[in-house]
Image: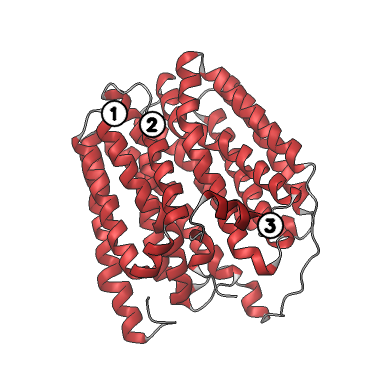
C-alpha cells in the first residue's frame, strides 16, 4: 500500500477532549504502550549523547577531525547493519532482537566510561551503530505486525512522536547531568534507560504474521531501488547538514560561552513535535513540493542565524526554525520520493533510509576535516550553501525530471 503522508504527520484532533476520544478509538493497547516505552527509553539514551559526546571527546583531547569521525562512524555502522538486521529477523523474533539490542546498548555505556579514544572508543561507537540499526528495524517490524491495518497509519504517526519527545527531553538533561555531576553519571543514566528498554521489551507480545502478496524473485533479492535515488538525494543532503550540526554545534556553542548547548536541540525537537501534531492544514493547503521548497529555505536561514550568532536566545531561535523544517522535511521528502519512484515497497523505503543514513554519517566526517582550515562560522555558512544547493537540485532537476517524464502521480 503506498505511503500516505497524512498517515504519518497529520493528527485530526482539535481539542484535548477530542484527542482523548480519538486516541481511545485507536486501540492504544497495553502492548502498543509497552512498545512505545521501549522505543522511547532507548531513544532517551541515544539523544542524550547528541550534545554531550562531542564535548566529552574534546575534554579527552580529541581534535575536530577525530570527533567528526567518532560521531559519524555511528551512522556508517548503522547503515550497513540494516542489512544484517533484516537477515536476523528471518531467524529470530522481533522481541528477541529488541531485547538483545537493548542489553548490548546498555553494555556499550560501560565501555564509554572505561575506554578512551581512539580505537577502543571507535569500537564502542561501531557497536552502538549496530544496536541502533537492529532495534530500530525490529521495533518497526514488530509494530507493523501488531497494529490493525485499519489504524496502522495513524498509530505509526503517534509512535513516531517518541523520537521528538526524546529529543526534547534528553539533550538538555544529559548536559545537565554532565555539567552538574560528571560524564560517568551521564553514561550510567543512559545505561539505566537502556535497561528500562530491555525490561519493557521483555513484556511485549508478538502478533500474527500477516500474509503478503508474492513478489517477483528479482525484486525480492534486490537491495537497491534505483528510481528513488534521484529524489532520495534531497534527504541525503538534508541529513548531511543535520549530522554536521549534531556533531559540531555543541562545540561552537560552548566556545561562544553557552553552558548548555542542549537547549538548541530541545527547541528544535519541540518545534518538530508541534509541526507533526498541527501540520495537517499545512499539508492539505501546500502540497509536497511547496513544503520541500519552503522548509529547505527555512533550514538555510536557520544556519545563517547560527553562523552569525553568539548568544543562547539566538541559538534557540535558530533551533526552533530548524525544527520547523525537520517536522516536515523527513516525512514529506520520503513520501515525495516514494511517489516519484512509484513504489512504497521495502526496497524503496530501505534505499531512501540508506541514503539518509549515509548523509548523516558523511556530514560529521567531511566537516571535521574542513573545520581546522576555516573555523566554525564559515562551516555553518558552508552548510547553509548546501541547503541552497539542495533546494536548487530539487527545483531544477527532480521536479523538472518528474514533470518531463511523468513519473508517478503529479505533485500535490
Q: Which residue is rendered at x = 71% and y = 56% of the image?
A: 142
- The image quadrant of residue 215 is bottom right
Q: In this view of the protein, can residue 291 be seen by the observer?
A: yes
Q: Dot 3: within a 10 Å radius of its alpha carbon, few (fewer than 14), some, or many (20 or more) residues? A: many
Instruction: Quickly name the residue at label 3.
Output: 143
Residue located farthest toward the bottom when viewing the structure as drawn: 405
| Left or right: residue 391 compared with residue 326 | left
The dot on residue 263 is 2
Residue 225: give x, y in percent of width and height: 52, 72
Locate the C terminus and report the quarter of the image it occupies.
bottom left
Q: Residue furthest front?
A: 17
Quadrant containing the N terminus is bottom right
Task: Report the residue marked by disc 1.
Answer: 312
Relative placement, left or right, of 337 versus 258 is right
Q: Are marks 3 and 2 in contact (CB under 8 Å)?
A: no
- Distance (Cα) linking label 3 and label 1: 39 Å
Furthest residue toward top: 181
Amino acid at each position: 500500500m503506498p505511503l500516505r503522508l497524512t498517515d504519518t504527520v497529520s493528527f485530526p484532533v482539535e481539542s484535548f477532549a477530542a484527542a482523548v476520544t480519538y486516541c481511545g478509538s485507536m486501540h492504544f493497547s497495553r502492548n502498543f504502550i509497552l512498545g512505545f516505552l521501549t522505543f522511547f527509553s532507548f531513544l532517551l539514551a541515544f539523544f542524550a549523547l547528541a550534545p554531550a559526546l562531542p564535548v566529552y571527546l574534546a575534554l579527552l583531547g580529541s581534535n575536530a577531525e577525530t570527533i567528526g569521525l567518532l560521531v559519524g562512524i555511528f551512522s556508517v555502522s548503522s547503515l550497513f547493519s540494516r542489512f544484517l538486521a533484516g537477515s536476523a529477523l528471518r531467524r529470530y523474533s522481533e522481541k528477541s532482537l529488541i531485547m538483545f539490542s537493548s542489553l548490548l546498548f546498555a553494555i556499550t555505556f560501560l565501555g564509554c566510561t572505561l575506554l578512551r579514544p581512539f580505537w577502543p572508543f571507535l569500537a564502542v561507537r561501531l557497536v552502538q551503530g549496530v544496536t541502533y540499526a537492529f532495534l530500530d528495524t525490529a521495533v518497526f517490524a514488530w509494530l507493523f505486525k501488531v497494529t490493525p491495518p485499519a489504524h496502522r497509519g495513524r498509530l505509526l504517526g503517534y509512535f513516531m512522536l517518541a523520537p521528538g519527545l526524546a529529543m526534547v527531553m534528553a539533550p538538555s538533561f544529559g548536559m545537565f547531568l554532565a555539567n552538574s555531576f560528571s560524564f560517568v553519571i551521564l553514561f550510567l543514566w543512559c545505561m539505566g534507560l537502556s535497561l528500562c528498554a530491555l525490561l519493557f521489551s521483555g513484556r511485549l507480545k508478538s502478533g500474527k504474521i500477516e500474509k503478503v502478496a508474492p513478489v517477483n524473485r528479482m525484486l525480492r533479492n534486490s537491495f537497491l531501488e534505483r528510481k528513488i535515488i534521484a529524489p532520495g538525494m534531497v534527504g541525503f543532503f538534508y541529513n548531511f547538514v543535520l549530522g554536521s550540526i549534531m556533531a559540531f554545534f555543541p562545540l561552537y556553542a560552548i566556545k561562544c560561552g553557552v553552558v548548555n548547548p542542549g537547549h538548541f536541540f530541545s527547541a528544535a525537537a519541540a518545534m518538530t513535535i508541534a509541526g507533526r501534531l498541527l501540520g495537517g492544514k499545512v499539508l492539505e493547503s501546500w502540497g509536497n513540493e511547496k513544503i520541500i521548497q519552503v522548509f529547505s529555505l527555512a533550514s538555510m536561514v536557520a544556519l545563517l542565524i547560527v553562523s552569525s550568532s553568539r548568544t543562547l536566545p539566538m541559538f534557540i531561535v535558530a533551533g526552533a526554525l530548524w525544527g520547523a523544517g525537520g517536522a516536515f522535511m523527513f516525512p514529506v521528502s520520503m513520501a515525495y520520493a516514494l511517489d516519484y519512484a512509484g513504489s512504497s515497497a521495502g526496497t524503496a523505503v530501505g534505499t531512501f533510509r540508506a541514503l539518509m543514513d549515509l548523509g548523516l554519517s558523511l556530514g560529521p566526517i567531511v566537516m571535521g576535516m574542513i573545520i581546522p582550515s576555516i573555523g566554525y562560522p564559515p562551516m555553518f555558512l558552508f552548510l547553509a550553501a548546501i541547503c541552497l544547493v539542495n533546494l536548487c537540485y530539487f527545483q531544477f532537476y527532480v521536479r523538472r525530471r518528474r514533470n518531463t517524464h511523468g513519473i508517478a502521480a503529479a505533485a500535490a
